[in-house]
Image (cartoon, grey):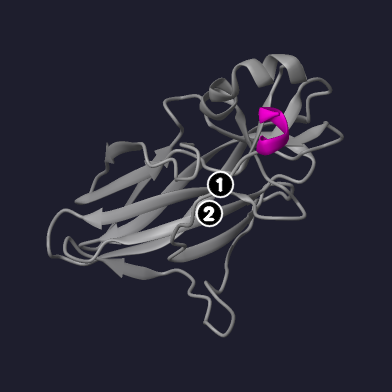
Amino acid sequence: MVLGGWDWIRTKINGPSGVTVYADRLHSCPRYVDMSKAGARKDLDAVYEQGVRVSDTSGDPAELSLTLQAKTSQAVVVTGVEIKVVSDRAVPSSGLVVYGECGGGMTPRPFDVNLARTPVPVRPVAPAKGDEAVDFPFKVVDSDPEQLTLQLRPGERDIRFTVEVEWVADGEHGSKVLDNDGQGFRVMGTGGLPTYGYGEMRQ
């Protein structure tokens, strides 16, 4: 994540049935690195460029945003998102977590994803107090894309997962698995790791 902003580096994936899915890189304020405090202080850029995204159970979770757009004006009905856990390990026992500064961002269709449960539930969340949570299904066309924000809750575990987006277009079922170039998306809890604020690391 660029400090004070969002990770907005997109991987474009073309799916069947005239649908395009964009998966944004995982973003979060806290990052984990397998470094000493002194090592992290010397290279804070590496912490934010290479660090594993961390979901703080007492604060904001790590997020993965998906943007869906139909290739034509014909409506596509997005029927759901399925999460598959490909590895589930204990949080590392060495290293540290650094809390950075987060910029603001939109959360258009937020969904809570509890990676600690099997099967993994994907539940709609109200964007703001008083708003209504909107669940699947919903429609997209070329002129009206939709963005989903998956709020990731791995518990106190180190999780890799993939995301499958499913839809129906012209009476036919389509789907696309997003697997981060075969590596899976990785997110973890803080565990018992030492944690430091960005300002503290700059001192």
Counting the numbered discs, the total is 2
Left or right of residue 154, residue 44 in this image:
left
Mark 2, Cα crowd under 10 Å, few <14 / some 14-19 / many 20+, is: many
Check residue 150 in the rendering and tell me which mark sits there, or answer none. Answer: 2
Q: Which residues are magenta?
A: 198-203
Going 65% across and 55% down the picture, which residue do you hit? 60
Label 1 and label 2: CA atoms lie apart by 10 Å
User: Does residue 85 show up magenta in the picture?
Assistant: no
Q: Nearer the viewer, residue 58 or 188?
A: 58
Instruction: State left or right for residue 82 relative to residue 97.
Output: left
Give the residue drawn at x 72%, y 16%.
35
Q: Position of residue 194 (x, y in %)?
A: 83, 31
Q: Position of residue 77 (x, y in %)?
A: 31, 65
Predominant secondary structure in magenta?
Answer: helix
Mark in front: 1 vs 2? 2
Give the SS element for disc 1: strand
For residue 75, the mark is: none
Compare residues 100 and 51 and report the one nearer the observer. Answer: 100
Q: Is residue 93 above or below residue 132?
A: above
Residue 75 point in image, percent of width and height: 21, 67
Where residue 52 sits: x, y (%)?
Answer: 62, 30
Q: Residue at x 16, y 64 (%)?
A: 143
Q: Are marks 1 and 2 in contact (CB under 8 Å)?
A: yes
> Which mark identifies residue 83?
1
